[in-house]
Image (cartoon, rainbow, N blue to C red):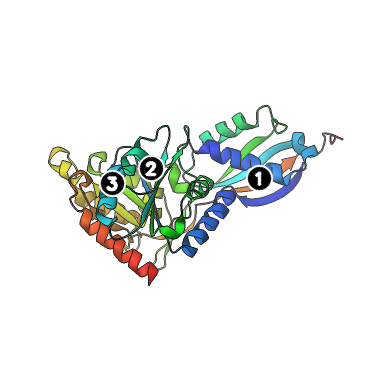
Amino acid sequence: MHELTLAAGILDIVQHNVLAADAARVRAVRVRVGDLAGVVPGSLQFCFEAIVTGTPFAAASLAIERVAAVAECRECGCTTGLSGPQFVCPACGALGMAVLCGEELQVVDVELDDAMARAS
Amino acid sequence: MSVVTIERKVLQKNDTLAAANRERFASNGLLVLNIVSSPGAGKTTLLEATIEQLRDRARIAVVEGDVQTDLDAQRVAKYGVPVVQIVTNGGCHLEANLVADAVGSLDLDQVDLLLIENVGNLVCPANFDLGEAMKVVVLSTAEGADKPLKYPAMFRKAAVLIINKVDLLPYVSVDVAEIRRHALQINPYLVIFETAATSRLGVTEWCDWLVAKLTAGHA
């Protein structure tokens, strides 16, 4: 259940990047989660909702953008999408392909509601 | 809608603290291991066996991570090495700041080898760098040969795999060669040892390898 720690980390980053006066205007927090990041998206969603409840960010929802895993063979150089956990090159059979993407765990941006007047 | 661009790693804070730990450990010439496994794989017994063999060859200290108790720290303290307990109170993994606080009470100049026993969990600790030189994953034979495939992140990030409880092999339908094959598919650079920590079988090979690492680090 490290998703709770991650949700707290996401909220912390948002708090540091959004003016306190704009907190209630945050509608969506966009995060990028790679397929190899070891994160359960549904669980992260649940934890984020739980952690913003009762805070000025209560209206914010978490928008999760998945990133598929892609790896490159260290032997033959071919690039392939990884669908399972086995890092075996489909072309030459070499083991332990190098991961190019799919490990992301980032806060991308937040969307603010323009219609809502800024709290003064 | 207006957009505020952020583009920050969620674990940036932990990564920064881990980097600071790593720098501190390096300046003290310390070799730091982050020992991970599922609950009951034998981390603490392996620690005991390792300390028993190495305490005359290296100055060892231990950081014990536990969800609720200090039972493991009590076991390790019997071997006469400094041990610091971190109780996470339900937390499923150690984080870099907890380790930074814990080592504050140790005299790191007097330590060559720092063994950090993480919370028993093959999932969450994979994401949290503590500033260690390497992760050592312990897998007991009774857990089954499919575990490297089911928990690939941990096996991909580890430098060493210790297949423990090989003395149980006559009683469990597990093939060590299959564990090895699965683990190497995930991470072909893994250094693998086979042990039965309770009876100290295979522990010498592991300890000799560690001593070589220590010597190389201090050369």
- Chain ID, mark 2: B
Question: Neighbour class for label 3 at 10 Å: few (<14), some, many (≥20)?
Answer: many
A4 up-or-down from B50: above or below? above
Residue at 33% x, 61% y is: B189
The residue that disc 1 covers is A13
Residue B56 spot, x, y in % from top left: 28, 58
Q: Identify which amino acid the numbered label 2 is placed on.
A: Leu
Of the residues tagged 2 and 3, which is closer to the observer?
3
In which quarter of the view is residue A28 placed? top right
Q: Identify which amino acid the numbered label 1 is placed on.
A: Ile
Q: Identify which amino acid the numbered label 3 is placed on.
A: Glu
The residue that disc 2 covers is B122
The secondary structure type at the circle numbered 3 is: helix
In which quarter of the view is residue B140 placed? top left
The residue that disc 3 covers is B48
Residue B80 spot, x, y in % from top left: 32, 47
- Chain ID, mark 3: B
Between the residue at mark 1 and the residue at mark 2, the CA separation in whole angstroms equals: 27 Å
